[in-house]
Image (spheres, rainbow, N blue to C red):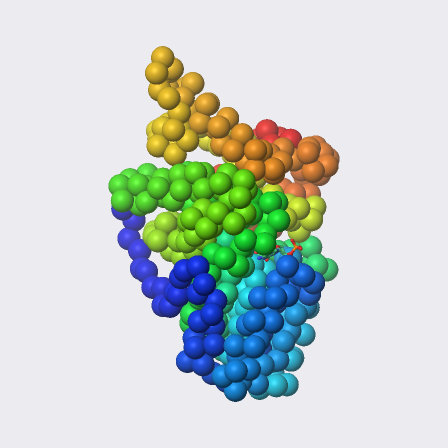
Amino acid sequence: MRPFEYHNPVRIVFGAGAFKRLGDEAAAIGNKPLLVSYADEPELTKSLQRGVQQLVDRGMQVTTFFQVQPNPDVQMVERGVELARDIAADYVIGIGGGSVMDTAKAIAAGVEYQGGDLWSMVNSRHDQDQVVPPQTALPTLMVPTLAATGSEMNNCAVLSHRERGEKSYIWSDCLFPQTAILDPRLTYTLPSLQTACGGVDTISHVMEIYLNGQDQSDLLHAWQEGLMRTVIENLPAALADPRDRHAREELMWCASCAINGWASPGDPWTPMHQIGHVLTARHQVNHATSLALVMPAWMDFFKTIKPERYFRLARRVLQVDPHRRTREQIIDEGIDAFRQFIEQAGLPTRLSQVGITHDDLGPILDDVRRISFNARGQLTCNPPVTEQQLTTILEKAL
Ligand code: NZQ
Ligand code: ZN
């Protein structure tokens, strides 16, 4: 096992119906919240009204900032920071998916930020000395309405800068929410596509580490396998019946656990996400789709470099029957099964399906190199990925 340090202070309130705890949990934090959510999400209107009512009933002065669009842009965050300062908010609540929670975190940090332009908080270049991460933030309370990014239980926010055409992370312990209320019922209204995206994103968070992280860590790998299997078993159930309470509960807790640090101690790299962020910034595909487009090709490239890992994935996660099959066949069937799982959920798995052509690969590579390559000119992971290898992977993904 690799050495690691672990810290996660987020208080979790989990369960069907937990949303009614919002007022009590909020009252323990402050009394002048900025409540952040989407600009236009009719499905959530009732939940938002219920949320506001609970806060008002506790005598709070609530101000709403319902301006979030998917893949939040730093300029929108600036408007939220201005509003939070104007009203002297003492904490920030996010009710929504990753875009909302990340916006809420960035506003909470932005209010106290002393590092200049808010974009300086973002790790958008590999020459890290230009980054000034936030040191302090207002407390936050998160209510995820989509089981996907795990933002509710981690110290990360992802922002975009439309003019620069960049998308990247803010990492700072001050971004850990104080409390997260996880009510799986809030996800019943999700359209199938968003449910599928959430499941694929959740798996990707663990698979990234499983495939590209350390080679020997028994508990870690067993934990990752269990989490991936749980999503593979429950996503079809939630797609078949959006009100399947058990499936929604499992998917919601999986999403939080996939990226709260438990599945990745000692393995901080997310190379497929680095490529995915560039695909989103350049080609406007949503976050989970950007990963679905890369993962099968990535696996097909690495299967001969790390055959043990891919064999284990095929057997223990994708449950390929080994009878009368060679190891190579089992590995290939595992990768095919994963591609089918994504496609059956309704997401594309090839760049050409979203209109990306061979001519687009050069600029995509340039951005991955500029934003995510380390000083040795590689994408950091185990083993590191060279530019030549990345070119081959993207060509395979077409
Ligand atoms: O479908 P529409 O009508 O557009 O409405 C919203 C929203 O636009 C819908 N939605 C959310 N909850 C709903 C609902 N619809 C009905 N019922 C509900 N209960 O879902 C759409 C997408 O929402 P969004 O917040 O964008 O999705 P997601 O949770 O996937 O978040 C994606 C963002 O999180 C970042 C991504 O890069 C992206 O910007 N990530 C954040 C991470 C983190 N903080 O740790 C890690 C992730 O890897 C990811 O990068
Ligand atoms: Zn993700």
Residue 377 visible in the snapshot: no
Q: Which quadrant of the view contains residue 239?
A: top right
Q: Which quadrant of the view contains residue 196?
A: top right
Q: Position of residue 292 (x, y in %)?
A: 57, 39
Task: Decide which of 174, 316 is in the foreground and name it.
Answer: 316
Image quadrant occupied by the C terminus: top right
Q: Position of residue 153 (x, y in %)?
A: 43, 61
Task: Decide which of 45, 210 is in the foreground and name it.
Answer: 45
Q: Residue at x 69, y 65 (%)?
A: 39
Q: Position of residue 391 (x, y in %)?
A: 59, 34
Q: Residue at x 36, y 12 (%)?
A: 324
Drawn side of residue 355 relative to residue 105, left or right: right
Q: Residue at x 66, y 70 (%)?
A: 66
Q: Please, is residue 316 above or below residue 46 in the view?
A: above
Q: Number of callouts in the render? A: 0
Drawn side of residue 174 relative to residue 6, left or right: right
Q: Position of residue 54 (x, y in %)?
A: 52, 77
Task: Decide which of 396, 44 is in the foreground and name it.
Answer: 44
Task: Decide which of 105, 374 is in the foreground and name it.
Answer: 105
